[in-house]
Image (spheres, helix red, strand yellow):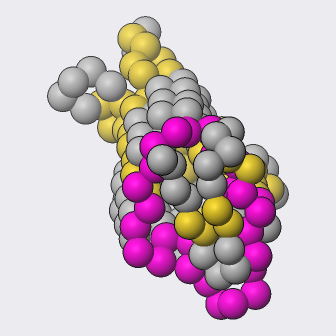
C-alpha cells in the first residue's frame, strides 16, 4: 500500500493499481509513478475492480462519490470493469492510455470525459449508462466498441475532437476518422 492506493508490481517492472481506498468526496489521482522500498515503478495499468463503489469507513459501509478521476501519463490500460459501478463526475485519462476495457466505467455517473492522445480502443459498454454531457477526445484513430457510450436515451454528447472529422449523436457517440 502507498497512501490510499494498493499496487501490484508486474513482471515487467511496472506497477498496476489494484485497489483505491480514497475517501468519499476526494479526487482520485492515479500517479505516473509509485515508489516502494526506495524503488520507483511506472504505473501502467488499472486493474479490474480497482475503484470501488463502497468503502468501510469507521466500521461503516459507505458509498463513495468522487468529483474527479485523473489517470497518470504512464497508464496504458484500464481493465474490464475497473470502476463499475461507482460515482465519478469527471474522468481525465492520461495521454498514454491506449485502451479502456469492456464495461470499465459502466454506470459510473460520468458527465465529462477526456480521452488522451494515445487512446486507440474503447471496449463494449465501457461508458454505458453514464450521463455524459461532454467528451473531449485528443486522438486521431479510435475504435469504439458496441454500445460503448450507450445510454438511457437522455444523454446528448457534444464531442470535442481535436480532429474536425467527427460526428456526435444522441444516446451514443460515433467517431469517424478518414
Residue at 68% over, 74% down: 169
Q: Is residue 103 above or below residue 42?
A: below
Quarter of the image where one finds residue 4: top right
Residue at 50% over, 49% down: 177
Residue at 76% over, 76% down: 156
Residue 34 drawn at (x, y percent): 49, 23
Q: Is residue 92 above or below residue 41?
A: below
Q: Is residue 59 visible?
A: no
Q: Is residue 152 above or below residue 143?
A: below
Quarter of the image where one finds residue 76: top left
Chain part drawn in magenta: 134-159
Q: Is residue 14 visible?
A: yes
Q: Residue furthest left?
A: 11
Residue at 25% over, 32% down: 10
Residue 112 drawn at (x, y percent): 75, 58
| Magenta stretch contains residue 141 | yes
Q: Is residue 169 left or right of residue 6?
A: right
Residue 87 drawn at (x, y percent): 69, 69
Amino acid at each position: 500500500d502507498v497512501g490510499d492506493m494498493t499496487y501490484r508490481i508486474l513482471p515487467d517492472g511496472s506497477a498496476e493499481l489494484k485497489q483505491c481506498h480514497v475517501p468519499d468526496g476526494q479526487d482520485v489521482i492515479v500517479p505516473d509513478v509509485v515508489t516502494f522500498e526506495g524503488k520507483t515503478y511506472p504505473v501502467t495499468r488499472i486493474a479490474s475492480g480497482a475503484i470501488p463503489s463502497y468503502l468501510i469507513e469507521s466500521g461503516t459501509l459507505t458509498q463513495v462519490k468522487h468529483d474527479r478521476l485523473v489517470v497518470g501519463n504512464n497508464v496504458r490500460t484500464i481493465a474490464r470493469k475497473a470502476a463499475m459501478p461507482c460515482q465519478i463526475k469527471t474522468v481525465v485519462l492520461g495521454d498514454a492510455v491506449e485502451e479502456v476495457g469492456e464495461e470499465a466505467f459502466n454506470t459510473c455517473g460520468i458527465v465529462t470525459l477526456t480521452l488522451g492522445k494515445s487512446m486507440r480502443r474503447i471496449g463494449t459498454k465501457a461508458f454505458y449508462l453514464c450521463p455524459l454531457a461532454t467528451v473531449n477526445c485528443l486522438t486521431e484513430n479510435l475504435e469504439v466498441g458496441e454500445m460503448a457510450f450507450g445510454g438511457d436515451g437522455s444523454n446528448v454528447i457534444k464531442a470535442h475532437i481535436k480532429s474536425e472529422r467527427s460526428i456526435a449523436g444522441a444516446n451514443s457517440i460515433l467517431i469517424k476518422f478518414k
